Amino acid sequence: MKVQVTKDTLIGDMLQLDRGIGVILMQSGMGCVGCPSAAMESLAEACAVHGMNADRVLADINEYLANKE
């Protein structure tokens, strides 16, 4: 079964799962992915702070994870 994240998944947990998720987050407009306080924010919280569409970012992350071999 492929791994999926949710809007409640913490940024730090996502980065531990796959560092490639950090690239998606940065390309989406979240430049502070490595910040210690970002690690403890959920995807929804981080997107809200940065004015990003959490559903779109979540879809991009899960598409990336689904296509990994």
Image (cartoon, rainbow, N blue to C red):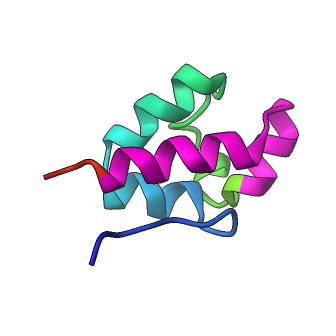
In the picture as drawn, the residue positioned furthest to the bottom comes out as: 1
**Does residue 43 belong to the magenta stretch?**
no
**Does residue 59 belong to the magenta stretch?**
yes
Which residue sits at x=64%, y=61%?
A: 40
**Quadrant of the rendered image containing residue 17:** bottom left
Above or below residue 32? Residue 2 is below
Image coordinates for residue 57, horizontal then vertical, percent = 63, 41
Residues in magenta, as a range: 44-66
Query: Nearest the camera: 17 or 5?
Result: 5
Which residue sits at x=55%, y=36%?
A: 33
For residue 16, side relative to residue 5 (left or right):
left
Which residue sits at x=27%, y=48%?
A: 67
Query: Nearest the camera: 43 or 37?
Result: 43
Which residue sits at x=69%, y=61%?
A: 42
Image coordinates for residue 8, horizontal then vertical, percent = 68, 69
**Quadrant of the rendered image containing residue 1:** bottom left
Question: Is residue 26 at all visible to an observer of this figure?
Answer: yes
Above or below residue 49? Residue 38 is below
For residue 17, side relative to residue 35 (left or right):
left
Above or below residue 23? Residue 6 is below
Image coordinates for residue 20, horizontal then vertical, percent = 33, 39
Question: Is residue 31 at all visible to an observer of this figure?
Answer: no
Query: Nearest the camera: 29 or 2?
Result: 2
Above or below residue 24? Residue 41 is below
